[in-house]
């Protein structure tokens, strides 16, 4: 049975707007639509021409990530065929390049927006290095702030700079815009080197240990958001209680905020007409060759963790057989 739209915006029929968004959201679907519409001119530039994955929440169901667009996707939604290594198949990703597409996603209860680090015209080049700062627990945001300052110093030491935003969860993301000279492998190496330098600058607070049990209650400086990875976009809501938002923050203001300060209810007023993500983002920078070389000497975290896991399993088996 078809559902009559509650209203229409930019040719998109919006339905069930007054239904709760999800349990513990403290928000309706209308709140989501209104928020995304209000900040569309800020979020669209960070989504444009990037293969997009979204997290949707159907009413009464668990949240799920959608990469492949559904069969009922309107023909005016631009898509791109992309090889997904994890599933060994081509996936048809959406490109959220305009307000109409964003509103359509909002009506599909797409709450989180995870664009790729590459653009469709240069799939072999990431546009940013990303350091994901993951504190050990939800109430340890101050630790993430301290780790972020270590990352900032590590960048400054090699002549680089970046912008910082809340993740919308418990941590922070540092984005470092780079030019198109660095290959995927070199960009990944540089990211590892920056993470290692941040760990060396403040070893009491920061760690690059990929295995959670090895982190010792420290902030994980995650350098694995590389290549075909996605990262929650600036201004994107999160499918979490209260519907927090991944929000750009000035470096000097980090000590004065918490992630809960920014939700779909509060973010538009805090933003006004500003676009702090664009304001704070440096111009694309060239990666220093010495930094790249340094990073190539650092093992890839996931690979290192896999080998270490196998080693520990062997030790455990040997001890059990003694």
Image: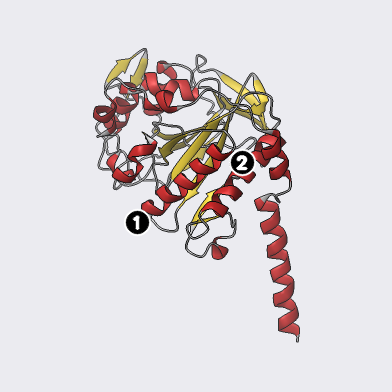
Residue 115's place in the image compared with 59, above or below, is above
Q: Residue furthest bottom?
A: 322
The kind of secondary structure element at disc 1 is: loop
Residue 139: mark in rendering = 1
The kind of secondary structure element at disc 2 is: helix
Q: Is residue 157 left or right of residue 320?
A: left
Tell me if I can see residue 246 in this picture.
Answer: no
Residue in the picture at 64% in, 24% down: 81
Please say which color scheme the image uses. secondary structure
Residue 310's place in the image compared with 178, above or below, is below
Residue 157: mark in rendering = none
Q: Percent position (x, y) of residue 304?
A: 70, 56
Give the Cα separation between the discs numbered 2 and 1. Answer: 26 Å
Residue 136's place in the image compared with 82, above or below, is below
Along the line of sight, which residue is nearer the eye, 102 or 130?
130
Q: Percent position (x, y) of residue 211?
A: 59, 60
Residue in the picture at 74% in, 72% down: 314
Residue 191: mark in rendering = 2
Crowd class of label 2 (few under 14; some 14 to 19; many from 20; radius 10 Å): many
Residue 220's place in the image compared with 316, above or below, is above
Camera-near label (2 vs 1) is 2
Residue in the picture at 54% in, 62% down: 215
Residue in the picture at 41% in, 54% down: 143
Q: Is residue 106 left or right of residue 219?
A: left
Q: Percent position (x, y) of residue 161?
A: 51, 33
Tell me if I can see residue 306 in this picture.
Answer: yes
In primary-sequence order, the first of circles 2 and 1 is 1
Q: Percent position (x, y) of residue 207?
A: 55, 56
């Amino acid at each position: 049975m078809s559902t009559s739209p509650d209203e229409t915006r930019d040719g998109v029929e919006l339905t069930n707007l007054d239904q709760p968004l999800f349990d513990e959201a403290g928000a309706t679907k209308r709140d989501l639509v209104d928020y995304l519409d209000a900040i569309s001119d800020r979020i669209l530039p960070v989504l444009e021409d990037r293969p997009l994955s979204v997290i949707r929440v159907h009413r009464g169901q668990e949240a799920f990530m959608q990469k492949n667009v559904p069969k009922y996707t309107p023909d005016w939604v631009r898509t791109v065929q992309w090889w997904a290594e994890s599933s060994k198949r081509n996936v048809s990703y959406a490109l959220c390049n305009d307000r109409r597409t964003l509103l359509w996603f909002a009506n599909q209860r797409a709450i989180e927006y995870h664009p790729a680090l590459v653009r469709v015209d240069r799939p072999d080049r990431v546009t940013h290095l990303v350091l994901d700062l993951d504190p050990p627990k939800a109430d340890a945001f101050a630790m993430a702030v301290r780790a972020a300052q270590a990352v900032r110093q590590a960048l400054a030491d090699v002549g680089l700079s970046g912008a910082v935003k809340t993740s919308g969860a418990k941590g922070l993301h540092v984005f470092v815009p780079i030019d198109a000279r660095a290959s995927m492998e070199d960009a990944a190496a540089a990211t590892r080197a920056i993470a290692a330098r941040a760990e060396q600058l403040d070893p009491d607070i920061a760690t690059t240990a990929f295995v959670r049990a090895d982190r010792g209650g420290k902030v994980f400086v995650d350098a694995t958001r590389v290549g075909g990875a996605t990262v929650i976009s600036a201004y994107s809501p999160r499918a979490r209680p209260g519907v927090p938002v991944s929000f750009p923050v000035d470096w000097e203001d980090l000590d004065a905020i918490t992630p809960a300060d920014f939700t779909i209810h509060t973010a538009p007023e805090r933003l006004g007409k500003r676009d702090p993500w664009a304001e704070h983002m440096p111009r694309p920078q060239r990666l220093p060759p010495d930094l790249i070389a340094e990073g190539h000497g650092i093992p890839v975290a996931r690979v290192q963790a896999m080998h270490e896991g196998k080693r520990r399993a062997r030790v455990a088996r040997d001890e059990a057989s003694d």
